[in-house]
Structure formats: structure tokens, C-alpha cells
Image (spheres, rainbow, N blue to C red):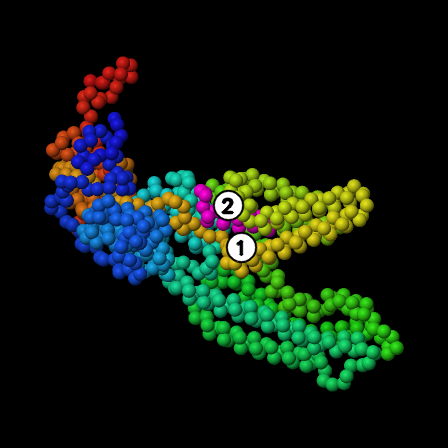
């Protein structure tokens, strides 16, 4: 038995595959659409595509690909559109898809494919509403096409409030074609966008089991390992509200938080200067007393209290700009950093009030400390060294705690966020997935950011090691610093393809330098601990600690400069916000752009004239075969419309994957099997079977019987 491809006339006498996912490009001559039966609602003329707002009428000028070989063949125009999409020319692809639809008014040879390609072109042009309309038309023409369902699901996810519909279409595509990777990738993408990392990982692994080198599944699986958050993490895609509206609400809350915290910090500095300044001036003078007048502490408290009124005005103004208050609790739950910013702002207001309340006592203690530290007389010089002692009096002051909280929260929050985001997820596993992807710019960018996250982890581990050694006064804790280079080496080995990592390090010199500095710091800390343990001279110990701490500070400066440089140039930075998903990356043709499966003339003739049609499906008892008798009709695009019993309808609802078998009554040896997806059409009372795979062959003759195991002769 020889495998081959059946020609348009079906004359090949061997068993073979006629087409899978569009391998059979034409209907063939002499085919019939069948007699009798019902066309169903899906057979009406497809709607026209919306007019192009800026495309040229000359396809050669648009795409640089020229006219197809047969300008009257809509499938060739679809092939041109797919090629132009692969070359990044959506406008030219849209024009070619429009030509295909105009040439195929009855969906006979590519209208459904043309609408899918037009939808993809609209999406890449940012015309999301038109992309959804074209995809819905493709689904109407071929409701059993997994590619059409996949295209509609991908288009719907960009429309506010239609995430659930997108999820339904993605699930249907995966149900219709579980052997294909792209539906599982879309299911994973939708789960990843909503933060369901476990389900996203499961879906991506399903896709990789079907196609190991799928770039989207590889890269997005790495993001799921990192527990990646999309830029609009505060917005739930399932909410029936425009994400731009929730973005404006989030922006108003962030601006309110920032304005209040900055205003209170500046106001507290002014209050402190007004309350503590006279005592310092009196101490720094030639022994003269402070000038008589209003109490500076009371005046400072009054001015500080007036600032709280300004805070109230800012709060009321910003509150009017938040028009989606019912969604704010959900936004705070989905975005912990937004919630933390709100909490810190409220705590800052309370701390500012506490600082004003304890200001008189703090001023008295400060004045007493000034008199003790600087007993200056008119004949003696100013004791500036004594003034330096005043710095030690503030930490023990009850006013210092709230004041430091008001002044330093703005610097502490970014540091806390950077460290927390670095320790989120599993970066080594993510690197293994990123490096396993093909040479892709998206994967290279995510590798770079992930290596920065590993570097921040190493830096924080060294800081903890140094702090433990100093606070516990035990230098042996610093010996743990040698584990940092070992951990970096282990990560390098487990990250998969080393040449991808080397290429990223060669491009990002800042990252390579930071990793080298971290290794140097760990060796310095370990050397300092060894000096103390071995009883070597103390100056060596102190010098190693000083250099190590200086290198850690240098690493922080390098990180800040790298982030600032990326912000200024508009390039990806070292933070998690620079991680991106893979959407249509790679050179592979996406599943929603693949050509549909067509039927040759011989197969159409067999189904149109045959009376021995058998429908195979699955039910709870196992596989079943049901004699249909005949096909109601064969649609222009190859869709079979069957009149079947109720149990076949119920089986199709449970599992729509079916197979239809027919023998040609004219050529008694010829048979054909169409494997596809059955959708019940209650209005037309038929099962509409969309082909996914077509197999043709000949019944074996006596000379093609099973061979004997001994002599190889046919069994009689």
C-alpha cells in the first residue's frame, strides 16, 4: 500500500491522504454540489469586507509580490495574502484577501479563508472591531472550522468585555482540533493574561507535546514560570468595561498617592526647619539668646496642619476623576502594588499627623541637647563638633519614627518592589524555556530581563549575608557568600542553550559587568571571613569589607543607570515590566491563517452519487458506525450536510470529531473518508461536517491480501 496524494480526478489507485489543513488546494473539475437536501443558513452570500481606508488598488505595489498565477482563483489570492502577512505587510495582505472574497461570493474556494486572513490583517493594523466582524463572518461560513474559531477567539480578546466569548471560542477550537498546538496556545494566553498561571502552564505543555518548537508556547510558558503580569494587571479581561477607563482610574489613584506623599515630605521638612532652626541658630551664634517673638514650634504646627487641608483638596479633586469606583476594590486585589501604594499613602498621612502631635516634645528635647552639646559663650568659638553629636539624639526621639516614615517611603517603595519582583517566579526554568525557542527577538529580550532578575537575587543574597555577619558579629556568616557564584554557575548550566545566554551577555554589557561585580563581591566577603577565622591582621579584614560594600553600591548604581538609560532611549530595561508575550512571533504560519481542506472532484462525485455513506462517531459505549444512506448536499467549500439520526446528533454534541466514509458507485473500487467536525444545524435539520482530513484509496484485490508470514504469498 503506497501513500500518495489524490489528484483532482481521483484516479490514483492507491490509498493516500488527499489533504490535511489545505493540502488539497482545488475543488477539481466535474464535481457536484449534490442534489436535494437543505443549504442551511450558512450558505447565503457572505457579507462584503469593509472598505480599506488607506490601501492601494494595485496588489503588486502593495505587497511587492505581484499578481498570483491565476488572478481568477480566490485560493491563490488567499495564498498571496498569507505570504504578505508572513512578510509583515498587513495592508497588502488585506487587499489580497478582499480580492479573494470578491471572487468567491458563494464561499466555494476560499471566502472563509479570505475572511480569516482579512481579520488577521485588520488586527495587525489595529482595527480590532473590523477584525472581529471578519472573523465572525468566517465562523458563519464554516462553523466547524477550528481555524475560524481560533481566529475569532484571538480577535475577541482585544475587545473590552468580550474575554469570556474569546475563551469560549478558544475552547471550541481546542475541542475541534485537539491535535493542533495553536488552540492550546490561545487557551494558555488567555489564562496567562488573567493570572491563572497553573492553567496557562498546562495549556502550553499540551501545545508543546504537539509541536515541540512552537515559539509562542515556549516563550509564554517561560512567562508563566516567572508569574508574569501584563502591563494592565489591575484590569480583569472579563470585566465589561474598556481597559482604558480602568487605566484612567488607576492613573488618578497613582497621581493622588504620589502628590500626597511628596507634599507631606516637603511640608515636614519645612516644619522641621521652622521648629528646630531657631535653636540651631542660637547655638551657632555668639552666645546670644533667640530673639523674642511667637513660639516657632506653635507656628510650625499651625503651618503643618494647614497642609492637611491641601491634602483634602487634592483628594477630592482626584476622587472626581475616578469614575469607576465599583471596580476599584477589584483593581486593588489584582494589583497588589497599587493597593500597597494606597495603604502607604494613608499611613503617611497618619504618620504626618503623629509627627505634628509630638513636635513640641521633640523640640524641647532637641533644644536641651543643643544646650548640652554647645555650651558657647560670647568669648568662646562655636563648638561645631558638638553640633554633630545632635544627630545621635534624633533616633531616640519619639518624633523620629513618624518623620522617617514620611520622608523615606518614596525611596523605600521602589526598592521593595524591585526586590519582591526579582524573587517572584522560577527564573531558571523560565530561562530554559526562553533559550529553547528559536532565534527570536522576543525570546532574546525576555532572556535579558530574566538574567537581570537573577542578578538582583544574587545582590540581595549578598546583602543578607553581609548584614548577618555584621549584626551577629560572626564573620563565619560571610563564608556563605561563596554560594552565590556557585548558584550563578548552576543557573547557567540549567538554563539550556548556553550560546543564547552568551549572545545576550555580549549585547548587554551592563548585565555582564554587574554579574562580574557580584562574583567579585562574593569573593571579597569570603576573603574577609577567612581573614578573621585564620587570625590574620585586622586591616585586611576591614579593607575587604569596605571594598565589598563599595562594589555592592556600585551594582546598585549600575542598575539605576541602566534603567534610566533604557527609559531615556525607549528601549527595554532591566525590570519585569520589560517582559513581553509572544504574539505571532516566529516564522511559522499561524494556525488561524492556514488554508481550509478542499474536496477533489472524485470525492465530491462519490458523496453526491453514493448511497452507502457511513458516519463514524464515538458514544459512551465506544466507537460506532451509522449508515446515513446519502449526503444531503456537499457545500461549495467542501462542507458535507448529513441527515442523521438523533443518536448521531447527541454524539456530535459530546464529541464533534467524526468520520464519514463513502464508496463511489461508479468506480466500485474507489472509496473516500472525510474526517472532520460535525456541527448540528437545527434550522436545516442536518449535521454540517467541515473537513479536516481527507483519505482516499481503492479496495484491495485478491493480489493485495494479507501476506503469509512464512512464504510471503497472499492468503486465499
Left or right relative to 92: residue 538 = right
Q: From the image, tell me which residue sits under label 1.
A: 573
Is disc 1 placed on a helix, strand or loop? loop
Crowding near the residue tagged with mark 2, few <14, some 14–19, many ≥20 C-alpha atoms within 10 Å: many
Of residue 523 and residue 333, the one placed in the foreground of this image is 523
Indicate whether 601 appears above or below 304: above
Task: Give the prevailing secondary structure in the magenta stretch.
Answer: helix
- Residue that extends furthest to the right in the rendered view of this protein: 379
Which quadrant of the view contains residue 33?
top left
Left or right relative to 428: residue 698 = left
Q: How many marks?
A: 2
Task: Give the magenta-colored segment's residue range.
Answer: 437-456
Q: From the image, tell me which residue sits under label 2.
A: 430
The residue at 61%/79% (across/down) is 306
Q: In whole angstroms, how far apart are the C-alphas of marks 2 and 1?
A: 18 Å
Across and down, in percent, residue 423 comes to: 57, 51
- Residue that extends furthest to the bottom in the rendered view of this protein: 293
Do labels 2 and 1 touch, CB within 8 Å?
Answer: no
Crowding near the residue tagged with mark 1, few <14, some 14–19, many ≥20 C-alpha atoms within 10 Å: many
Across and down, in percent, residue 237 comes to: 40, 58
The C terminus - image quarter: top left
Across and down, in percent, residue 448 comes to: 53, 49
Is disc 2 placed on a helix, strand or loop? helix
Is residue 445 found inside the magenta-colored segment of the image? yes
The answer to which of marks 2 and 1 sits earlier in the sequence is 2
Across and down, in percent, residue 372 comes to: 82, 72
Which quadrant of the view contains residue 712?
top left
The residue at 58%/60% (across/down) is 414
The N terminus - image quarter: top left
Observer able to see residue 469: yes
Is residue 689 found inside the magenta-colored segment of the image? no
Amino acid at each position: 500500500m503506497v501513500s500518495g496524494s489524490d489528484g483532482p480526478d481521483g484516479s490514483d489507485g492507491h490509498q493516500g491522504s488527499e489533504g490535511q489543513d489545505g493540502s488539497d488546494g482545488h475543488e477539481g473539475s466535474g464535481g457536484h454540489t449534490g442534489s436535494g437536501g437543505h443549504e442551511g443558513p450558512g450558505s447565503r452570500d457572505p457579507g462584503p469586507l469593509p472598505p480599506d481606508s488607506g490601501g492601494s488598488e494595485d496588489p503588486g505595489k502593495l505587497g511587492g509580490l505581484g499578481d498570483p498565477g491565476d488572478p481568477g482563483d480566490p485560493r491563490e489570492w488567499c495564498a498571496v495574502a498569507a505570504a504578505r502577512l508572513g512578510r509583515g505587510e498587513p495592508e497588502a495582505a488585506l487587499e489580497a484577501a478582499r480580492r479573494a472574497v470578491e471572487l468567491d461570493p458563494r464561499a466555494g474556494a476560499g471566502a472563509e479563508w479570505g475572511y480569516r486572513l482579512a481579520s488577521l490583517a485588520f488586527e495587525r493594523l489595529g482595527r480590532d472591531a473590523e477584525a472581529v466582524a471578519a472573523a465572525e463572518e468566517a465562523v458563519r461560513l464554516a462553523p466547524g472550522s477550528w481555524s475560524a474559531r481560533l481566529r475569532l477567539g484571538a480577535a475577541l480578546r482585544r475587545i473590552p468585555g468580550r474575554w469570556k466569548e474569546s475563551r469560549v471560542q478558544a475552547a471550541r477550537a481546542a475541542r475541534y482540533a485537539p491535535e493542533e498546538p495553536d488552540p492550546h496556545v490561545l487557551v494558555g494566553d488567555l489564562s496567562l493574561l488573567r493570572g491563572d498561571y497553573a492553567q496557562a502552564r498546562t495549556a502550553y505543555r499540551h501545545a508543546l507535546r504537539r509541536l515541540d518548537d512552537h515559539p509562542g508556547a515556549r516563550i509564554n510558558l517561560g512567562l508563566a514560570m516567572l508569574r508574569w503580569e501584563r502591563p494592565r494587571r489591575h484590569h480583569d479581561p472579563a470585566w465589561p468595561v474598556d481597559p482604558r477607563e480602568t487605566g484612567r482610574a488607576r492613573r488618578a489613584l497613582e497621581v493622588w498617592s504620589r502628590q500626597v506623599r511628596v507634599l507631606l515630605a516637603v511640608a515636614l521638612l519645612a516644619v522641621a526647619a521652622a521648629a528646630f532652626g531657631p535653636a540651631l541658630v542660637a547655638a551657632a551664634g555668639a552666645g546670644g539668646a533667640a530673639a523674642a517673638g511667637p513660639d516657632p514650634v506653635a507656628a510650625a504646627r499651625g503651618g503643618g496642619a494647614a497642609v492637611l487641608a491641601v491634602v483634602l483638596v487634592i483628594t477630592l479633586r482626584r476622587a472626581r476623576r475616578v469614575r469607576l469606583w465599583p471596580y476599584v476594590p477589584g483593581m486593588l486585589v489584582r494589583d497588589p502594588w497599587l493597593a500597597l501604594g494606597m495603604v502607604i499613602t494613608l499611613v503617611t498621612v497618619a504618620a504626618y499627623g503623629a509627627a505634628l502631635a509630638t513636635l513640641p516634645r521633640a523640640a524641647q528635647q532637641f533644644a536641651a541637647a543643643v544646650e548640652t552639646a554647645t555650651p558657647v559663650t560670647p568669648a568662646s568659638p562655636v563648638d561645631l563638633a558638638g553640633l554633630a553629636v545632635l544627630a545621635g539624639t534624633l533616633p531616640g526621639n519619639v518624633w523620629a519614627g513618624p518623620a522617617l516614615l514620611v520622608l523615606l517611603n518614596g525611596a523605600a517603595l521602589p526598592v521593595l518592589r524591585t526586590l519582591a519582583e526579582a524573587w517572584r517566579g522560577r527564573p531558571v526554568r523560565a530561562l530554559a524555556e526562553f533559550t529553547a525557542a528559536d532565534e527570536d527577538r522576543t525570546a532574546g529580550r525576555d532572556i535579558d530581563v530574566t538574567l537581570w532578575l537573577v542578578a538582583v537575587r544574587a545582590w540581595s543574597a549578598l546583602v543578607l549575608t553581609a548584614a548577618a555577619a555584621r549584626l551577629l558579629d560572626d564573620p563565619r556568616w560571610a563564608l556563605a557568600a561563596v554560594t552565590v557564584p556557585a548558584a550563578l554557575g548552576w543557573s547557567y548550566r540549567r538554563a539550556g542553550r548556553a550560546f543564547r545566554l552568551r549572545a545576550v551577555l555580549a549585547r548587554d554589557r551592563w548585565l555582564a559587568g554587574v554579574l562580574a561585580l557580584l562574583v567579585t563581591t562574593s569573593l571579597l566577603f569570603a576573603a574577609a571571613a577567612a581573614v578573621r577565622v585564620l587570625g590574620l591582621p585586622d586591616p585586611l579584614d576591614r579593607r575587604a569589607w569596605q571594598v565589598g560594600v563599595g562594589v555592592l553600591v556600585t551594582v546598585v548604581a549600575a542598575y539605576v543607570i541602566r534603567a534610566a538609560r533604557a527609559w531615556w532611549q525607549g528601549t527595554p530595561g532591566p525590570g519585569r515590566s520589560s517582559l513581553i508575550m509572544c504574539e505571532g512571533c516566529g516564522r511559522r504560519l499561524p494556525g488561524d491563517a492556514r488554508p481550509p481542506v478542499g474536496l477533489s472532484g472524485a470525492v465530491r462525485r462519490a458523496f453526491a452519487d453514493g448511497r452507502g455513506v457511513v458516519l463514524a462517531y464515538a458514544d459512551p459505549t465506544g466507537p460506532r458506525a451509522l449508515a446515513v444512506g446519502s449526503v444531503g448536499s456537499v457545500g461549495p467549500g467542501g462542507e458535507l450536510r448529513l441527515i442523521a439520526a438523533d443518536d448521531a446528533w447527541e454524539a456530535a454534541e459530546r464529541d464533534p470529531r467524526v468520520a464519514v466514509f463513502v464508496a463511489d458507485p461508479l468506480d466500485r473500487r474507489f472509496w473516500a473518508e472525510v474526517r472532520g467536525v460535525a456541527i448540528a444545524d437545527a434550522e436545516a435539520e442536518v449535521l454540517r461536517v467541515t473537513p479536516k482530513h481527507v483519505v482516499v484509496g481503492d479496495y484491495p484485490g485478491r493480489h493485495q491480501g494479507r501476506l503469509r508470514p512464512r512464504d510471503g504469498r497472499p492468503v486465499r
